[in-house]
Amino acid sequence: MNQIIHLLRINLINSFNINTLFSKEILKKKNIWKPLLFVFIIVSIAPSYYLYIGMIENIGKSLLMINQESYLMVLASTSAFMVVFFFGIFYVMGYYYFSQDTNLLISLPIKPNNIVISKFLTVLLYEYVILGIFLIPVFMVNSTLVEGGILYIIKSIILFIALPIAPLSIAAIFVTILMKFTNIKGRKDLYRIVSMFAFLFVVLGLQIIIQRNMMSVEPGKEQEFISQMFMDNKFMLETAGRFYPLSKWFSLTFYSNNWILYLGLFVGSTALIFALSLFISNKFYFKGLIGTEESTSKKKALNSKEYSAVLKSSPQFISIFLKDFKVLLRTPIYLFNCVSTVVIIPFIFIVMPLMTGSGDMMSPIIGLIEANLETALLIFAGAFMMFSLLNPTASTTFSREGKHFWIDRSLPINYSSHIIGRIISPMVLHLATILAITIGFNYFIKLDLIYLLIPFVVGFLGGIPLSLIGLIVDLKRPLLDWTNPQRAVKQNLNVLIGIVANLIFIAGLVGLNYLFLKIDLNFTLIILLDIGLISLSSIVLYKYSIKYIASRLSSIN
């Protein structure tokens, strides 16, 4: 037990940089902007969080009106399961297999089981922080529905503690088995990436199918379905419980007189799943860990022509781009946070409406777009730029190098190649995302090619200055001292600073476009002005970044 506590403490210090947070350095003048930025972010998101709480209250009231208030906790717990499981796959893979302290830990006289438990608890604590933000308002709203008191608070604390353990354990089981059985010579990275995304899409697909069938009503039986809801206050809970038994028990802990039974079922099932996770981890974890940093190459005798082709040089910026992009694809944390948006965003906005059959509900929106086409195209261009803003690839480009950054710094690479090579990766991802969205959007609303190209071109070009801003932010203060790649992306303050800086840039463009529309400027002229302003901003930022990297590169430690 002492080993687990010490390992957990070390993991928390390394992962969350706790020593820095509570050090006197944070109060020095040069660092005072950090707490101020934190306060600014809290104040900025407070209105959105207030709206979120209001939304939860409205959902609770709506369910109460149809006598199905118990379904609120089913919705909350099911959503929490999916969020923890989805994020847990990448976090477990990062902490278990790609943390730089793993090789050191396995060489020490520490029980393998203690290493696994400490890493699991580290990820679990991170999930508690995320879930707390979203679930505390749900527990508060639900307390008004069941008239909660001290007993309600005790039950809520127990359930909140137990809630993420089961989905995170299932994620750990999947990752452990995946890493063990794909730990083969050759294209192990490709096998793991394909298997991971294939599994996630299967899970999401099953969820969509379940959601479609769970509340489906046969034609002609709509009245019977409605009357059942009003007569049986657990109708929706029981219907969902056929597919999500843990969610059913979670909710019945609050809404049943036999709450001790359901609490025991929930906690007991969670404990069994966690025990199974530990058993599988003990069997396969170290077998999957062996060789994770190894690479293979095909040995082949080359003739003179092939040898010349191998030695053929490529532009410096292409080499930097290829190296950067390969690291993005091979590191699960980077893959999830930077690359997966290319798949996830189109999936949410295009595939899910098609699979759930909600595409037909977009007809009023489509009519509104057609009636205000010019304004809608500008909004779409701004939305495409927002996709670039939300991707942390540019604002972590130097931080992701970690302690190996000295290699790039010491190579004879010109400064423009550093900038161009590192900008290509976020721009490729941005291009793929908006291209998929544009093609999918054209499925719902048929537009002439020119109207599809306008937001596409403006949105793509808008990604250039946004990426340059993110790069400059990361160049200013790269986070190179980390033991887990998660710190370079998920816990990197540069991402937040980049988002704030980019929001200011986008807000300026939005303000100018609003002014252009107010004075009834010709739409073609507005587009040309937008392209001109974006291009000018890109040139200015590019020239500044080259000058800045020339003075900054040698001083980065």
Image (spheres, grey):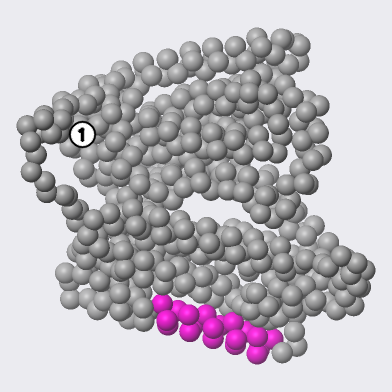
**What percent of the width, then of the height, locates residue 435?**
54, 34
State which quadrant residue 508 falls in: top right
Per the image, the residue denoted by label 1 is: 408
Is 261 part of what is drawn in magenta?
yes
- Magenta-tinted stretch: 259-277
Residue 221, placed above or below residue 31: below
Q: Can residue 472 be seen in this view?
A: yes
Q: Residues within 10 Å of mark 1 (few under 14, many from 20)?
A: some
Given the image, on which type of amino acid does mark 1 rest?
A: Asp
Residue lying at 22% horizontally and 26% vertically, measured from the top left: 314
Q: Which sits in the foreground, 254 or 458?
A: 458
State which quadrant residue 89 falls in: bottom left
**What percent of the width, then of the height, locates residue 540?**
42, 15
State which quadrant residue 216 falls in: bottom right
Residue lying at 73% horizontally and 16% vertically, measured from the top left: 517
Quadrant placement of the N terminus: bottom left
Please identify the dominant SS of the magenta region. Answer: helix
